Image (cartoon, coloured by chain):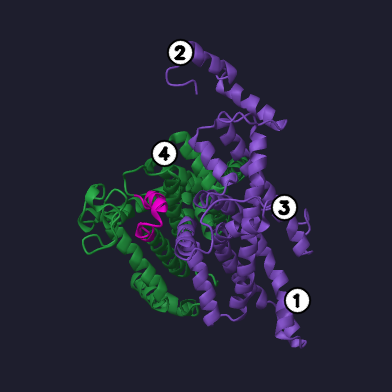
Chain colours: A green, B purple
Amino acid sequence: MSPSTTAPAAVLASAPSAEPSRLARAWRQARHRPASVVGAVVVLLFVATAIGAPWIGGADPMQADWKQVRKAPTLAHPFGTDDLGRDNFARVVWGARISMQAGVFSILLAIAVGVPLGLVAGFYRGAVDQTIMRLTDAWLAFPFLILAIGLVTIMGPSLTNATIAIGLGATPTYIRLTRGLVLATAAEDYVQGARALGAGDLRLMSRHVLPNIASSLLVQATISIPIAIIAEAVLSFLGLGVQPPAPSWGTMLNTAQQFLETAPWMAWWPGLAIFSLTLSFNLAGDGLRDLLDPRDY
Amino acid sequence: MAGTDADAAGIEAIREKYGLRDPIPFQYLRWVGLALRGDLGNSIRTSESVITTVATKLPITIELAFLSLLIAVGIAIPAGVLAAVRRNTFWDMLASGASLGGVSIPNFWLGIMLILFFSVRLGWLPASGFVPIRESPLDNLQRMLMPAFVLGTALAAVLMRQTRNSMIEVMSTDYIRTAYSKGLAGRAVVFRHAIRNSLIPVVTILGLQMGALMSGAVVTEQIFVVPGFGRLIVESVFTRDYPLVQGVVLITASSYVLINLLVDLSYSLLNPRIRIGGMPRES
């Protein structure tokens, strides 16, 4: 139990100034979890890298240079160069943009499709619920990545299609999670109370149920974004995602695999980038979960 | 399929041969009908039957999955139990940190790094390839070791976390306190009372992770050039061998469902208090 839940009187007393106290609580939590703070900072650094790629990357990530093929890291090329003499540092930096795009947009898609379906299923129960959930079960019968591979096969390989495929692959998780949360929340007295006051279904769902399940959905998003980032890298690695010459960490690793003996640095940096980004996301997510969803783990 | 300079007659012949002139729903029903009778059609590329192709590839992946499961369980359960019993100590932090790293590391990069280190640098293990187990069990194992480890780590990370959490939960129950207070040694309590009861959620996660294992096999087999089911999936996708893609996807989905059914059934084995049909079903 965290100290903030011990004294109801204290909570009431500080109620008028709820905003600062919430911030204060977040800060107190943060000091106890330095790893989560570091994770959050690294995630923000990657976001900044993705946005500022044109300024940070330096060289053109697609500019081939036949005099600089597979050169080991130097001051001019801190991450070395690849098989076409392109600057690996610039490619890793630009790769952040693609990874972030794929990770964030695919999960936004999963939320946009999954949450309304789960909300409707959990709120109305009965036949609607049965229909949606049985379809979800069928959807879940495909392992996530296999489903994504299958969808990309149909739609053709590209970053947009990979993002859509990953998003649709992650959707059933959100349907299930939302439905479960809605079932619990809709039975709460305050929802029943609002209904008794004459609130319509739409208002109940949007004003009373959704805000109360939002934090759990946010926590789930911090878990699924790193998974989506890895999934994009995997699809690109298999040649089903981003197409060359665009710099994706997955495609870079695919190329690197052919030159492990002569140019191992080609394999280090893109992988290290994926690893540190997903690790940071998971660390930050752990902290966020403790903050928003204070069950004892 | 008919070649780039095919004439209209050639194209028509192929449409005729594969029944492509029928309406799509009709084609689908025909496929389902045949599939129910165990006929998944023939591969367009090799014209071998889909069932035969899968039957030759599947055992390789099953061996890989089995080995990685062995590695995952062998690491995860002792580490999880240790972390829970020595909660908030150095061991707990080490195990939790390793678990977080295992979840975050992309397995295909781990595979590449292992090849770089053990094959290219040290030359201890062959980087890729496959030797059937019947030809030489030792060579087979040597080549399966790295892929199985790569596939096992991600699973181990998830399992470890679950084992730790449920061990902690079980260790705080009344019957564990009773076991302690009747004078049982710590070791006996942990081994005889706690572990068994904490394994149920672990088995659930294990079942759910089978999907991740199948997805992982796709990538791992690609990196280590293991000619298994995962590689077949990618190959069939790239060659646009649709009957093969359909068959492979169908088999993946049904085995996934089957495994989860087996997991559900195994609950009552682990915990006799759960009887099938005895509890209201809640999904």
Q: Residue furthest top?
A: B9
Q: Name the chief secondary structure element in magenta.
A: helix
Q: Judge by depth and name the residue closer to the eye, A20 or B206.
A: B206
Q: Earlier in the sequence, mark 1 or mark 2?
A: 2
Quick check: is A8 in the magenta stretch?
no
- Same chain for mark 1 and mark 2? The answer is yes
Task: Examine the rendered structure and indicate whether residue B142 appears above or below residue B163.
Answer: above
Identified at 46% across, 77% down, the residue is A4
Front: mark 3 or 4: 4
Give the residue pinned by disc 2: B7
| In contact (CB < 8 Å): disc 3 and disc 4 | no
Identified at 44% across, 69% down, the residue is A287
Horizontal and vertical percent for residue B235? 52, 39
Mark 3 to mark 2 CA distance (whole Å): 53 Å
Instruction: Give, as a three-letter code, the residue at label 2.
Output: Asp
Mark 3 to mark 4 CA distance (whole Å): 35 Å
Horizontal and vertical percent for residue A190? 52, 59
